[in-house]
Image (cartoon, rainbow, N blue to C red):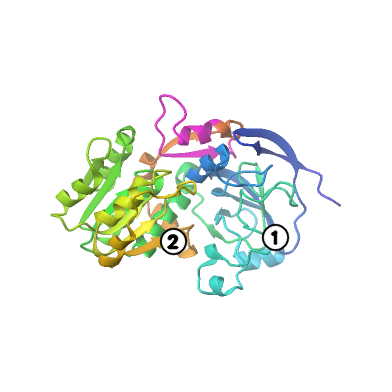
Amino acid sequence: MPNVMNTVAMVQTAPRTLQARELPVPDIGDDDGLLRVEACGICGSDCEQFTGVLPVRMPVIPGHEPLGFIEKVGKNAAKRWGVREGDRVVVEPILSCGNCAICKRGLRHLCSDMSEGFRCYSYIPVATPPSLWGAYSKFMYLDADTMMHKIDPTLPPEIAVLYNPLGAGFRWAGELGGIKAGDTVLIIGPGQRGLASVLVAVAAGAERIIVSGLSKDQNKLALARRYGATHTINVDEDDLVSSVREITGGAGADVTVEVSAYAVEPVAQSLSTTKRGGTIVLAGVKGMKEVPGFVSDLAVVQELTIKGALGVTSTAFRDAIALIERREVDLSAMHTHSFPLAEAETAVRTLAGEIEGESAIACCLLIDSD
């Protein structure tokens, strides 16, 4: 008998337009599943999707940082994922084929199978069956190519849902940055992923951790110091390059992790904040803007390694979940705002800094509590 149950989802129909819609909950076969969404983290890219900066095919259900419970699961999928109905899980956003050469190297987030376009939760249009491709919804479809991880069911949802930004810290600062004991690390941008990079740098034994931000980021810079940053720089008041040189005695950082949003100047500055032979990780997206003043010869003569960062590996997600489950770090300080599903637009605008009087670090939708 066909499933006729409907669910409520917030659907983006145009830039800056989210509408509540009822959509059918699909039948589940042997190879797929259904997630009852408990919470969904709000990512910086959600803000770009909301404003129309990202070229997303609409209408679409946003949300690619889901936490929830397995509502239904096919027998083959249950075996493949190692889950059963009722398990609490977090879901990786990118749907990879698992068979291409890149996937087999363990880089599933860079899957080269683009035969159906970029397959990622929150970016697949509602018109693509079975429609529930995003976590701004009470239920989310679990495609057969999904990767997921079980997580402690006793964790508060607003803490458990931090798995994605923390995973980015482990991937960008740890795996790509290669931070090691004794290093000097510069993190440009004190948002949730910048703060996650601080925690990773501390765990790696970095000797100096420098975090830069704007005047409006004072609460984030204070939290960076609380999490282990040894120096913070307000770039509205002090020049980034000269400040880093002063702190490091002219040497620069072993690793620079650039995670600021939209600003292109830090990309050019990173060539002068990083020491000879050092590594630059570029993770902050800039809306496809060109970078004035980027002098490639500086990278050549200093033998700098420049790495782009897209997404998170399964190993980084596992490291992030382990950090959360150990409960050794007060992650509640990173979470600042929770919203019901119906207030998804306010949640996104809060993270984007558009709500007067609100200073957000990490926001989430608490969907299961509606």
Indicate left or right for 149 with 276 as reference.
right
- Residue at horizontal 59%, vertical 33%? 16
Disc sitting over residue 215 in the figure:
none
Q: For mark 2, give the secondary structure.
A: helix
Q: Nearer the viewer, mark 1 or mark 2?
A: 2
Question: Is 360 included in the stretch rendered in magenta?
Answer: yes
Task: Read off the magenta span.
Answer: 346-370
Q: Where residue 332 sits: x, y (%)?
A: 39, 41
Question: Is 232 included in the stretch rendered in magenta?
Answer: no
- Estimate the spatial distance between the alpha carbons at disc 1 and disc 2, rounded to whole Å: 24 Å
Farthest left residue in view: 249
Say if 337 sits above or below 150 in the image.
Answer: above
Q: For mark 1, give the secondary structure.
A: loop
Split into 4 quadrants, where in the image is the C terminus? top right
Indicate left or right for 323 with 186 as reference.
right
The residue type indicated by label 1 comes to: Asp
**Residue indicated by mark 1:** 32
- Residue at horizontal 39%, vertical 62%? 307
* Of residues 78 and 140, the one drawn nearer to the viewer in this rendering: 140
Farthest right residue in view: 1
Q: Where residue 54 sits: x, y (%)?
A: 56, 46
Q: State which quadrant residue 279 falls in.
A: bottom left
Q: Where residue 38 sits: x, y (%)?
A: 58, 44
Q: Is residue 296 visible?
A: yes
Q: Where residue 274 sits: x, y (%)?
A: 26, 58
**Residue indicated by mark 2:** 316
The residue type indicated by label 2 comes to: Ala
- Residue at horizontal 67%, vertical 62%? 144
- Mark 1 or mark 2: name the one nearer the start of the chain: 1
Q: Is residue 230 visible?
A: no
Q: Specify few, some or many for label 2: CA neighbours under 10 Å numbering under 14, 14-19, or 20 or more.
A: many
Indicate left or right for 272 with 330 as reference.
left
